[in-house]
């Protein structure tokens, strides 16, 4: 019991402290600290500010829907069907996840810029048209750019959950006469609805909190979203209190999203992993498997292959503006980063160290909290769940300021240390870890733990011997879901890095501000390769799916 | 106090710090040896110009001939440049903010209203304009950072600068020693170094301005002392920056 209380205290410390400071700041006057409502009046009194909120909602909804359209079919195809080339598609999906959204945005600007985008140029050459058809500088363009970076969330959640569903219920439906489509839409997908919705919600929240990609695309498109609008509040003179007030509705949105998820799922049972054993068989699609592969490849082309092609061209180029030319090729950019620029070497090491540590911390904490909530070990457990979800909806910029205020000054004095970055990342990605843990836990029937306890084991024994192995793949997925965004996290890192704790994302950002795209692309390529290698290793370590009979 | 020497690109910071008595007075020997345009920004010797850059008009040489490019700032408002110009944003870039202040001083806000009619592409940093030119998205960098552009051109990108006849905007970036610095002697030595010929050679190798008369820019690169430069005063920067950012938002919508 004491263990649970300690964990709950840790959660309160990590999440509640910065957020309480934020809420308090929103009601305070800048210099005197007196309580006032003026910040809210100023933050919401102007039309442009309100329009930015609407734009963010539009962006979030569009991204969630598009990411769902990309992620769910691919997850289903990989988990339940005999589509070929699964390993390759999996690798591509991780590639999409590893590419930081603003790196993808830069690639897409080169591909779909209205005047000089490669795709537009190809169109103009092929059809003789006077101008291109794609314009990345638009809300639609931004939605696509963010969705191709976010759909892996939906994929991983849905895939992990589908992996745990045995075929017996599908068999039952089939025996009763249902066709393939009816089974899929009537039985299989509804069973993983919590995971799917979890993924959609995470995509939505990530989209509205992003800063890098909107800064690159929305500003030239002449519209603001909440994150770019918040940056304005941090211009000189800094208006932290107004920013805090402006950030409050985002918190309200989380509450709404959470309530939505609960009401949608209602009281239907989602237990699909019971103690009675079962196998998972692949559905034979026949000729349709090539159609599924085609769809998956199309998504991968949009999210990975096209942007990477463009960025690789820059990484190997002496001068990126000169395009493809044999005399434009060079390895100098890679040599510069890997051997000559000492800061880059430190940054690469730091990035993976901090990301790994945060991932472990986030998974451990969120699993514990999810267990407490799911099994209702304490009263008000739903408030804990809300605390776990809340950080994700605060834009990284604002969350970082909260951390800075809470942890940087004495008595902790953590500014410029590795600890503050790890703490910040852990808190920032707690919602993802929690959603994955909760979705995984929700699909496991408590009867197996009860069996352990009937035989004399305690709760911890039940978790160790039954729950953890069952959740292995879910947890591995969740670990990666925290590790990888942590390697590319920019908005909170940029406020907290010190001279000895620089990370790759901040370096990439600095390089983009300098316009040094050749070195930026080379560094991005290094990041991508290293992260994919680590991810492949992680999957190998986790082991095979225990339910798949035969192989 | 966590730092000994502070270097930024906004002279307004030093006006503020000097007011709050947070800067230490120290006049380096080298202070009298820099070019005239970089001397005497603070008669009390609490901060000195340690780096400088210029903003001119950049253009894509693969798509535009030098003869056709605009020759001065007002040329940017010519309707033939509609949809062709890239700019930075004063809210994100101190350089661009200073440029906006300077041109407002020269031509009033009507200049920007006319510029807005040409539908320029607005990025964040002043270096975003170089990116847009390299990508081929836009032809002209209305706020063209000379250092970044020439550095990019040296790598082979198709860029060149026009130094406007009504004046190239000069950005000066000061440094100062903080009061209570933990290493005051090292700080003073560093200030000396920043103003030395050796430091200027490093600046010049990276296409920034040289502060010393004896260090010349590489061939083909124009130096600030060879063109007509214009800039706002420290006072104008401190007072005017928030105002122009607001005006920019109203005119350009973002």
Image (tube, rainbow, N blue to C red):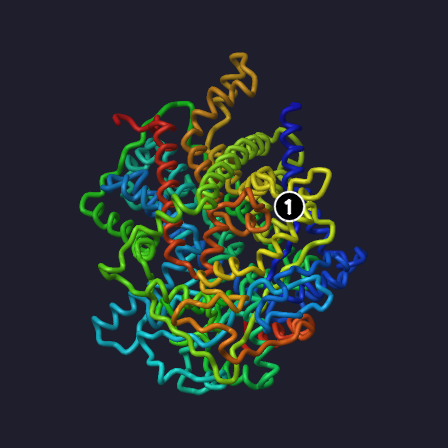
| Residue matched to label 1 | A403
Q: Residue at x 30, y 65 (%)?
A: A322
Q: Is residue A9 left or right of residue A125?
A: right
Look at the image and tell me in which quarter the N terminus of chain A lies.
top right
Please indicate, yes or no, whether residue A385 appears anywhere in the rendered image.
no
> Quick one: label 1, few (<14), some, or many (20+) residues within 10 Å?
many
Residue at the outermost top position: A456
Q: Relative to B78, does residue A93 appear above or below in the rendering?
A: above
Q: Is residue A542 left or right of residue A4?
A: left
Look at the image and tell me in which quarter the C terminus of chain A lies.
top left
Question: Measured from the top left, where is residue B125 in percent x and y?
Answer: 51, 65
Q: Relative to B169, does residue A496 appear above or below in the rendering?
A: above
Q: Residue at x 51, y 62 (%)?
A: B200
Q: Element at badge 1? A: helix
Q: Relative to A367, does residue A452 appear above or below in the rendering?
A: above
| Badge count | 1
Q: Nearer the viewer, residue A361 or A546?
A: A361
Question: Measured from the top left, where is residue A97 in percent x and y?
Answer: 40, 47
For residue B46, what is the image quadrant?
A: bottom right
Q: Residue at x 19, y 43 (%)?
A: A286
For residue B153, what is the image quadrant?
A: bottom left
Q: Nearer the viewer, residue A107 or A3?
A: A107
Please indicate, yes or no, whether residue A538 appears anywhere in the rendered image.
yes
Q: Circle 1 marks a residue in which chain? A: A
Q: Is residue B98 left or right of residue B62?
A: right
Question: Measured from the top left, where is residue B252 in percent x and y?
Answer: 54, 76
């Amino acid at each position: 019991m004491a263990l649970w209380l300690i964990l709950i205290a840790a959660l309160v410390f990590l999440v509640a402290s910065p957020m309480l400071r934020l809420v308090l700041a929103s009601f305070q006057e800048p210099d005197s600290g007196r309580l006032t409502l003026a910040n809210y009046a100023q933050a919401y009194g102007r039309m442009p500010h309100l329009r930015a909120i609407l734009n963010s909602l539009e962006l979030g909804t569009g991204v969630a829907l598009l990411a769902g359209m990309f992620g769910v079919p691919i997850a289903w195809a990989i988990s339940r069907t005999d589509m070929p080339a699964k390993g390759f598609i999996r690798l591509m999906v991780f590639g999409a996840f590893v590419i930081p959204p603003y790196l993808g945005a830069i690639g897409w600007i080169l591909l779909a810029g209205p005047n000089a985008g490669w795709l537009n140029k190809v169109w103009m050459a092929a059809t003789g048209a006077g101008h291109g058809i794609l314009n990345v500088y638009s809300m639609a363009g931004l939605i696509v750019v963010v969705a191709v970076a976010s759909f892996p969330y939906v994929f991983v959640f849905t895939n992990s959950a589908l992996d745990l569903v045995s075929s017996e219920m599908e068999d039952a439906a089939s025996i009763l006469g249902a066709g393939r489509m009816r089974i899929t839409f009537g039985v299989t997908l509804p069973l993983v609805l919590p995971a799917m919705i979890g993924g959609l919600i995470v995509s939505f929240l990530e989209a509205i909190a992003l800063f890098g990609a909107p800064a690159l695309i929305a500003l030239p498109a002449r519209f603001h979203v909440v994150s770019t609008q918040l940056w304005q509040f941090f211009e000189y003179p800094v208006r932290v209190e107004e920013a805090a007030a402006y950030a409050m509705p985002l918190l309200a949105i989380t509450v709404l999203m959470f309530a939505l998820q609960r009401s949608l799922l209602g009281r239907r049972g989602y237990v699909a992993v019971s103690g009675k054993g079962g196998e998972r068989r692949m559905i034979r699609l026949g000729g349709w498997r090539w159609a599924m592969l085609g769809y998956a490849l199309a998504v991968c082309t949009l999210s990975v292959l096209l942007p990477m092609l463009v960025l690789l061209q820059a990484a190997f180029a002496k001068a990126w503006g000169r395009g493809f030319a044999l005399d434009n090729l060079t390895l100098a950019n890679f040599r510069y980063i890997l051997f000559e620029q000492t800061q880059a070497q430190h940054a690469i090491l730091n990035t993976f160290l901090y990301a790994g540590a945060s991932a472990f911390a986030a998974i451990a904490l969120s699993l514990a909290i999810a267990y407490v909530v799911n099994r209702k070990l304490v009263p008000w457990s739903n408030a804990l769940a809300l605390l776990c979800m809340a950080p994700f909806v605060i834009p990284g910029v604002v969350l970082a300021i909260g951390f800075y205020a809470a942890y940087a000054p004495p008595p902790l004095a953590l500014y410029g240390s590795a600890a503050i970055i790890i703490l910040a990342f852990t808190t920032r990605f707690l919602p993802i870890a929690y959603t994955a843990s909760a979705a995984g836990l929700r699909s496991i029937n408590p009867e197996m733990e009860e069996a352990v306890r009937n035989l004399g084991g305690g709760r911890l024994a039940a978790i160790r011997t039954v729950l953890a192995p069952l959740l292995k793949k879910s947890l591995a997925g969740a670990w990666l879901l925290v590790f990888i965004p942590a390697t590319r996290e920019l908005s909170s890192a940029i406020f907290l890095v010190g001279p000895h704790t620089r990370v790759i994302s901040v370096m990439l950002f600095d390089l983009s501000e300098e316009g040094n795209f050749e070195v930026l692309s080379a560094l991005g390529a290094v990041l991508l390769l290293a992260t994919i290698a680590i991810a492949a290793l992680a999957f190998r370590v986790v082991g095979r799916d225990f339910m798949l009979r035969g192989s | 106090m966590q730092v000994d020497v502070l270097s930024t690109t906004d002279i307004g910071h030093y006006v503020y710090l000097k007011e709050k008595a947070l800067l230490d007075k120290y006049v380096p020997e080298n202070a009298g040896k820099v070019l005239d345009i970089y001397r005497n920004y603070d008669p009390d010797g609490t901060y000195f110009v340690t780096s400088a850059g210029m903003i001119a008009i950049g253009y894509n040489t693969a798509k535009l001939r030098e003869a056709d490019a605009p020759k001065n700032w007002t040329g940017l408002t010519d309707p033939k440049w509609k949809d062709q110009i890239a700019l930075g944003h004063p809210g994100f870039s101190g350089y661009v903010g200073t440029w906006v202040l300077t041109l407002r001083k020269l031509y009033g806000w009507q200049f920007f209203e006319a510029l807005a009619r040409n539908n320029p592409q607005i990025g964040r940093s002043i270096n975003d304009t170089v990116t847009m030119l390299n990508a081929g998205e836009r032809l002209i960098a209305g706020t063209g950072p000379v250092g970044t552009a020439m550095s990019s051109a040296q790598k082979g990108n198709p860029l060149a600068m026009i130094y406007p006849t009504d004046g190239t905007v000069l950005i000066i970036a000061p440094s100062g020693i903080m009061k209570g610095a933990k290493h005051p002697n090292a700080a003073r030595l560093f200030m000396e170094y920043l103003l030395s010929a050796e430091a200027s050679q490093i600046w010049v190798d990276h296409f920034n301005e040289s502060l010393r008369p004896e260090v010349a820019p590489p061939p083909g690169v124009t130096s600030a002392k060879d063109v007509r430069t214009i800039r706002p005063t420290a006072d104008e920067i401190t007072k005017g920056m928030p105002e122009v950012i607001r005006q920019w938002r109203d005119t350009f919508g973002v």
